[in-house]
Image (cartoon, rainbow, N blue to C red):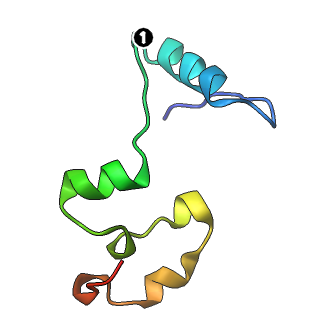
Amino acid sequence: MLTILLEKNSDIDTIKKKVGKSVNADFVGYNTVENLSAGIGKKSNQLCMACHDGEYGVLNRNLSNETSE
């Protein structure tokens, strides 16, 4: 398990540097929701993003049948 201590208001560049150093990587990047959904062929409303937005109500929906974005 990887544990990285970050200050409360760490900016994304600080986070990427600390994560990269801890896993010995030259580069660490994060996908946008749009790039993630396009990359896996799902619309963004078909994805559970609760770990990002704190909205866990999506877990009560049938995501496989939704068509609108």
Answer with the quarter of the image where residue 56 lies: bottom right
Q: Is residue 22 above or below residue 1?
A: above
Q: Nearer the viewer, residue 8 or 35?
A: 35
The residue shown at (54%, 84%) is 57
- Identify which residue, 11 or 5, lies in the foreground: 11
The quarter of the displayed image where residue 38 is located = bottom left
Question: Which structural element holds mark 1?
Answer: loop
Residue at the left extreme, as displayed: 41
Which residue sits at x=20%, y=56%?
Answer: 40
Could you classify mark 1 by the number of other residues whose Cα lies within 10 Å: few (under 14), some (14-19), or many (20 or more)?
few
Q: Is residue 45 above or below residue 32?
A: below
Residue at image location 47% in from the left, 65% down from the top: 49
Percent coordinates x, y for residue 6 in the rendering: 72, 29
Q: Residue furthest right?
A: 8
Q: Quadrant of the C terminus?
A: bottom left
**In screen coordinates, is 69 left or right of 10?**
left
Q: Name the residue located 61 percent from the left edge and 22 percent from the top edge.
A: 13
Number of numbered discs: 1
Residue 58, image x, y percentages = 47, 81
| Residue marked by disc 1 | 24
Q: Position of residue 39 (x, y in %)?
A: 22, 50
Q: Amino acid at mark 1?
A: Asn
Q: Position of residue 53 (x, y in %)?
A: 60, 63
